[in-house]
Image: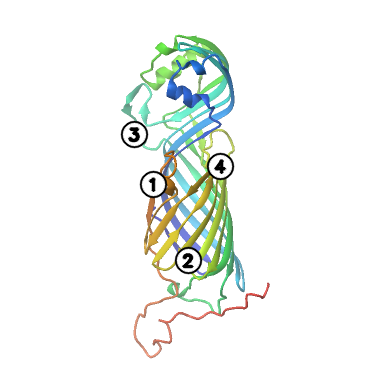
Amino acid sequence: GPSAMVQLGKHAFGLSTSAQVFSSGNRIPYEMPLFGYYGMDESSLQNINYIDYDIDASAAAWMNAGLSYAYVAYERFDQKITVGATIKYVWSYAGIYMESSNANYIVLNDSTINIKNLNGSAGYALPVDYADSDQIVDEPLFKGRGFGFDLGVVYVKKKTVDSERWNRLCSQEFDDYVYRIGVSILDLGSMNYKNNAELHDYENVAVYWQNYDTTSFTNIDQLTSDLSNLFYGDPNASYAGNKIIIGLPTAVSVKADYNIYKNFYAAGYWIHPIRFNSHTLRRPSQIAIVPRYESKYFEVNLPISVYEYKYPRVGLSARFWFFTIGTERLGTWLGISNLNGLDIYASIKFGFGKGDCRIRFKSACNDDNSLNKKKKRNNFNKNIVF
């Protein structure tokens, strides 16, 4: 945030801001973190022909400002369908990705690697001087820009039906619901980097690399030129351009919410990533059910989720009037699960009560039975099907 939203009858308008640091990896081979932890001199990892495919890793830091619009496209009795969209302008401070469609290699010993075949690329736009990593490059501050879009539709089965139209913003009442179901596409778009950006390609390269353990680099330019010279015999041959593109973490989302009884609800959602290429950030998949108790001044949620379709998690959040605090990993905080991640979040949200207009002046036409009272709405028999 900060963010704000206002509803005007069938129309709703919103303004939102956010900042994110996001990283993702896909099909990271099991041996790579082991080499990182034990080192290349680990004998159990040597003299094995590793053949890895479709590896990628990406990271980016950005902020965005978005405009949202939603419209009640259909409303009949106690049923309503709303469609909406958000367009976001994105400013990215930094971005980097690495990808390899094929890596075939053997670590022979602690000083020799036989790279039989490698196809891959690396792109980056970072706030550093590539010739001197100690120097910060902050002109321009944002190395990339782009657009993002959210699109969605929501079906609502309401508890009540409006008996009359509202002619003042404050007199619009909250439409309580029996259930609602929504489908959306999130973060459809990309970030284009044209400032301090470099792209390097390594196509069908191979090398028998001896004494690699004595190789050291003091800056990024030295690293890329030495690798290019190693694979191609030319320190500039790997350079492929000064522009890169990193896709936003696009995903499809399906959500449902059901009013069990009075203030008790049960929600559920499914989020699955959509990737258009190997340098698109990957949003993790999630399935969750979220029972909750909700009132005007207090709310508690107990999200029970499965992360990436295999890691179960239990969270807890509570809202006290306008302040919310919570975690998606309650077990880690309680010390009853492995410490492989930790999170905590908090938010402040102020809302203006619907259906309650303050009296602007006293008159004979303005008494306890007029403007300062909520307008009644008719309840319909829930057995009627439309």
**How far apart, in angstroms, are the residues tagged by discs 2 and 1?**
39 Å
Q: Earlier in the sequence, mark 1 or mark 3?
A: 3
Marks 1 and 3 close (CB-CB < 8 Å): no
Residue flagged by tag 4: what amino acid is it?
Lys
Q: Earlier in the sequence, mark 1 or mark 4?
A: 4
**Which secondary structure lies at badge 2?**
strand
Which circle marks residue 310 in the picture?
A: 4
**Which secondary structure lies at badge 4?**
loop
State which quadrant residue 26 falls in. top right
Marks 2 and 1 close (CB-CB < 8 Å): no
**How far apart, in angstroms, are the residues tagged by discs 1 and 4?**
20 Å
Q: Earlier in the sequence, mark 2 or mark 1?
A: 2
Position of residue 287 relative to residue 102, above or below, is below
Q: Which residue is mark 2?
A: 7
**How far apart, in angstroms, are the residues tagged by discs 1 and 3?**
38 Å
Q: Which residue is mark 1?
A: 333
Q: Which residue does the image show at 46% across and 17% down from the upper left?
A: 42
**How far apart, in angstroms, are the residues tagged by discs 3 and 4?**
41 Å
Discs 3/4, front: 4
Q: Position of residue 118 (x, y in %)?
A: 57, 19
Q: Give the crowd class for mark 1: few <14, some 14-19, many >=20 residues within 10 Å.
A: some
Q: Which residue is mark 3?
A: 138
Q: Which residue does the image show at 56% across and 33% down from the upper left?
A: 278
Q: Position of residue 283 (x, y in %)?
A: 52, 42
Discs 2/1, front: 1
**How far apart, in angstroms, are the residues tagged by discs 3 and 2?**
40 Å
Q: Position of residue 60 (x, y in %)?
A: 44, 37
Discs 3/2, front: 2
Viewer-nearest residue: 271 or 186: 271
Residue flagged by tag 3: what amino acid is it?
Asp
